[in-house]
Image (cartoon, rainbow, N blue to C red):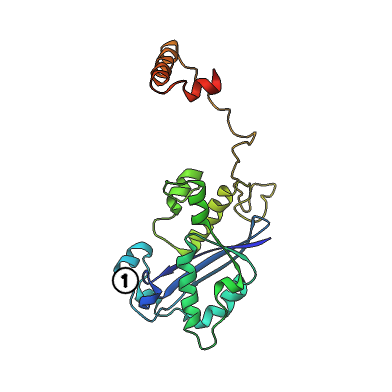
Amino acid sequence: MRQVVLDTETTGLEPQLGHRVIEIGAVEMVDRKLTGRHFHKYVNPEREVDDGAFEVHGLSRAFLSDKPLFAEIVEELVSFLRGADVIIHNAGFDVSFLDYEFSLLKSPPAPMAQQCQITDSLAMARHKHPGQKNNLDALCRRYQVDNSARTLHGALLDAEILADVYLAITGGQTALFAGAQNGEGEGEQESEFLAPWSDDRPPLKVIVPSAEELAAHEALLDVLDTASGASLWRQSFG
């Protein structure tokens, strides 16, 4: 199973207003393990970057002025994505921008949805954690994923972080980096997400209620019984 975790940065929020892609980062996973292959490009948007967008990613028009145009990198991008399950946080945003960039080309490739499967990790997180914050930073805190290097948004860094978050959301254990450590402790480090049922987790602390707390609980059940008949708790647990 080949998956690609992707993120983009843009000049603004709406391609309909002519905003453009300025950075694309993507990392490859096969059988839920990062392979070490990645795609990363800065792109010259040939327009100004909105102030609000610059505050998010720190990429200025001056910095991007000598970077390749989207037309120069599209073939490599499409080759990297084609046929994969592409995982994107808030996929509608990134897909709309990439499809817009495709539409500007003389010989545009097929839209993203026709080239690959799209998985929206934000939709997954909202389904699993309804009513809670599900942006990437919030998910990193929830799943104890290290995002300390994320002082500004960056497409490749965010794709790497999202890969770790996605694997945590979907409940698997995997190495963050391809390869194993050698006998001398050198080489690429590995980090694992420990499932809640893992034997490596410390035992849960059991807090036994005091006599006063038990009495208060029974008094509350008496109030509920008086107000609405037998409480659900007493029906279920006696």
In the drawing, does residue 215 fall left or right of residue 32?
left
In the drawing, does residue 201 fall left or right of residue 49?
right
Comparing 35 with 96, the one in front is 96
| Farthest residue, direction top | 211
Asked whether residue 27 appears in the rendered view, the answer is yes
Residue at (31% x, 71% y) in the render = 50
Asked whether residue 19 appears in the rendered view, the answer is no
Vertical position of residue 5 compared to residue 113: above or below:
above
Vertical position of residue 207 compared to residue 160: above or below:
above
Residue 115 rendering spot, x and y as whole percentages? 61, 73
Residue at (65% x, 70% y) in the render = 83
Picture quarter containing residue 17?
bottom left
Comparing 186 with 201, the one in front is 201
Quadrant containing the C terminus in the rendered view: top right
Picture quarter containing residue 194?
top right
Residue 227 rendering spot, x and y as whole percentages? 38, 21
| Farthest residue, direction front | 229
Vertical position of residue 223 compared to residue 39: above or below:
above
Comparing 199 with 208, the one in front is 208
Residue 217 rendering spot, x and y as whole percentages? 43, 17
| Farthest residue, direction bottom | 106
Quadrant containing the N terminus in the rendered view: bottom right
Q: Residues within 10 Å of mark 1 (few under 14, many from 20)?
A: some
User: Which residue, given by chain and number where applicable, does mark 1 sit on?
Assistant: 50
Q: Amino acid at mark 1?
A: Asp
Total number of numbered discs in the rendering? 1
Residue 74 rendering spot, x and y as whole percentages? 54, 79
Vertical position of residue 212 compared to residue 37: above or below:
above
Q: Secondary structure at mark 1?
A: loop
Residue at (62% x, 72% y) in the render = 82
Residue at (67% x, 55% y) in the render = 179
